[in-house]
Amino acid sequence: MNYLLESGTFTAEEIARIGQRVASGSLALQGAESFLVDLRATWSIEQAAEHLDMFPGVIKAAVVEGQILAVEIGQKLRFPTFQFNIGRPEPLIPHLSELIDTARGRWDWISTAALMRTRQSSLIAAAKQAPRDWLIDGGSFDQVGNIIESTDRR
């Protein structure tokens, strides 16, 4: 717990609140809610194909090559939406293949999706940014990779 305080990630008050939430069971409920949010934030292969302007077979090959992240849910491929760069010229977020490679074997897809939408104290431009936004705004992947790799040292 001292690590969390010393790193500035949490204040003593935040840790106390989390402790209360754990004791009341609300943290487990929040975890289930987060899973359901991430589950809903996926596209079918047809939706991904339309966004990427690719045939499904090409997308499946890109998944095998680690260029796009796909997960199997209910025996169907689903594509977490954090990786799509909607409304921008590039259809995928920058450094996606590096992200997939770095997270593989360390984190499951839900943890990766949660990271990509959670503001990080180490990713600061005008304010704290989520890794997804950091990468879209031209931030270095090294800093995002360091966040993922830091889990190995804990």
Image (cartoon, rainbow, N blue to C red):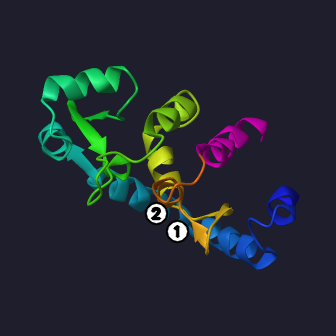
* Residue indicated by mark 2: 29
Range of the magenta residues? Answer: 141-154
Quarter of the image for residue 45 reads top left
Q: Image quadrant for the C terminus?
A: top right
Q: Nearer the viewer, residue 21 or 85?
A: 85
Left or right of residue 145, residue 63 in this image: left
Amino acid of disc 1: Ser
Amino acid of disc 2: Leu
13 versus 130 height, above or below: below
Check disc 2: other Cα within 10 Å, few if <14, some if 14-19, many if 20+.
few
Q: Secondary structure at mark 1?
A: helix
40 versus 54 height, above or below: below
Left or right of residue 2, residue 90 in this image: left
Q: Is residue 143 magenta?
A: yes
At x 32% / y 34%, what residue is drawn?
70
116 versus 120 height, above or below: above
Residue 92, image x and y in percent? 34, 45
Residue 148, image x and y in percent? 63, 42
Q: Residue furthest front?
A: 89
* Residue indicated by mark 1: 26
Check disc 1: other Cα within 10 Å, few if <14, some if 14-19, many if 20+.
few
